[in-house]
Amino acid sequence: MKKRFLAVVVGFLALTAIGYAALVWRSPAKAYWQGYAEAQYVDVAPVLTGRLTRLFVHRGEWVKRDEPVFDQDDANELASVTTALGSLAQAQANLANVEAPSRPDEIAQDRAALNQQMAQREKIAGDLERYEHILGRGSVTRQLVEQTRMDLAAANAGVMQASAKLALAKSPTGRADQIAAARGALEAAEGGLAQARWALAQRRVLAPRYGVVADTEAIAGDTITAGTTVVRLLPPSNIRIRFFVPETAFATIHLGEPVRVSCDGCGRGLTANISFIAPQPEYTPPVIYSETTRSQLVYMVEAQPAAGLAMRFKPGQLVDVRPLAEPTAQ
C-alpha cells in the first residue's frame, strides 16, 4: 500500500514538473535587462598650492557654472601684481624717454633759426635777381653779382643745416638699439603683469559645470596642494544608466534609441537614450543575478537620461531597462 502511494506521489510531481517546464518554454522571455545608475563626478581642485580661506558651497547645494566654489590665500599674488605694475610703469617711462624728441624750447629755437636762414636766403636771392637785371647798365659790377651768387649758395647751405638740426631735435634721443631694448623690456614687463594677474585669479576657484555638490573634502584653514580635490560636483548630464544585454538581444539595440528605465522610487515613464554600446562582450558581472544568463556573455550598454530626469537616479541604484516596444506572446 505504501509503495503504491509513493508511486502516485512521484508520478504527480513528475507531471507537475513537466507541465511547469512546458509552460515556461511556451511563455515569452522577459525582455528586460538589469543594470545600475553610474555617475561621473567632476573634481574641483586648485591649480596652485595654498591655504584654503573660504568654502562657498556645502554638500547637497546646487551651483551654477562660474559661481565661486572656494578661495585660497592670495597675499603673495597681490604683492606680485603690485611689483609687476611697478616694473611695467618703469619700462613704459624708459621707452618714452628714449623715444622722446628734444625739449620743446630747444625745438622752438631750432625752428626759429631755420626760419631766419630761409628769410636770409630769400633776401639774397632777390638781390641777385635785381643785380643780374641791371648788370648791363653800369650801376652794379660783375664782381658784386658773383659775390651775391656765392652768398646765395652759402644761404642755401645754412638752410639745409638748420633744417637738419631741427629734424634731429624732433627725432628720438635714443639710438635704435636702445629703443629696441626698451621695447623688449616693456613687452617682458607686460608679460610679467599678465602672469601675476593670472596667478591671482587662480586663487578664486569657480565651478566648471552646473551641478550638485556631492561632497566637500577640505575646510577653511587647510593647505591644499595643486590638483587635490576640494569639492566634487555631479552635473546631471554626467549620470548614465549602465546595463548588460545578452548576446541573444544584442542585435536589437542601437545607438540613439530610447529605452524604458524603472527602479524603486524613481517614478513612472522614465526613459533614456542609448549613448554607448561596448564593442566586445564580457562575462556576466557578479552583481547581476539571473539564472538564465549568468553563464552567458553580455554586452555593456550605457544610456543617457534627459537632464531633467537624470537626478531621479542615485549613483549605484539598481535599475531595470526595457525596450519601449514590449514583446508579445506567441
Image (tube, rainbow, N blue to C red):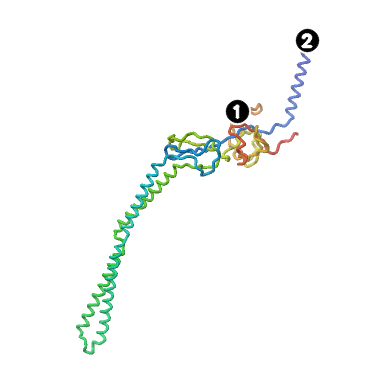
**Residue 145 percent coordinates (x, y):** 22, 82
Q: Which marked residue is nearer to the observer: mark 1 or mark 2?
A: 1
Question: What's the residue type where badge 1 is placed?
Answer: Val
Question: What's the residue type where badge 2 is placed?
Answer: Lys
Q: Is residue 71 left or right of residue 153?
A: right
Q: Is residue 28 visible?
A: yes
Question: What kind of element bears circle 2?
Answer: helix
Q: Is residue 234 visible?
A: no
**Residue 76 percent coordinates (x, y):** 38, 42
In primary-sequence order, the first of circles 1 and 2 is: 2
- The image quadrant that residue 75 belongs to is top left
- The residue at 73%/27% (across/down) is 24
* Pointer 2 residue: 2
Question: What kind of element bears circle 1?
Answer: loop
**Residue 77 percent coordinates (x, y):** 40, 43
Crowd band around label 1 with a 10 angstrom C-alpha radius: few (<14), some (14–19), many (20+): few
Give the quadrant of the C terminus: top right
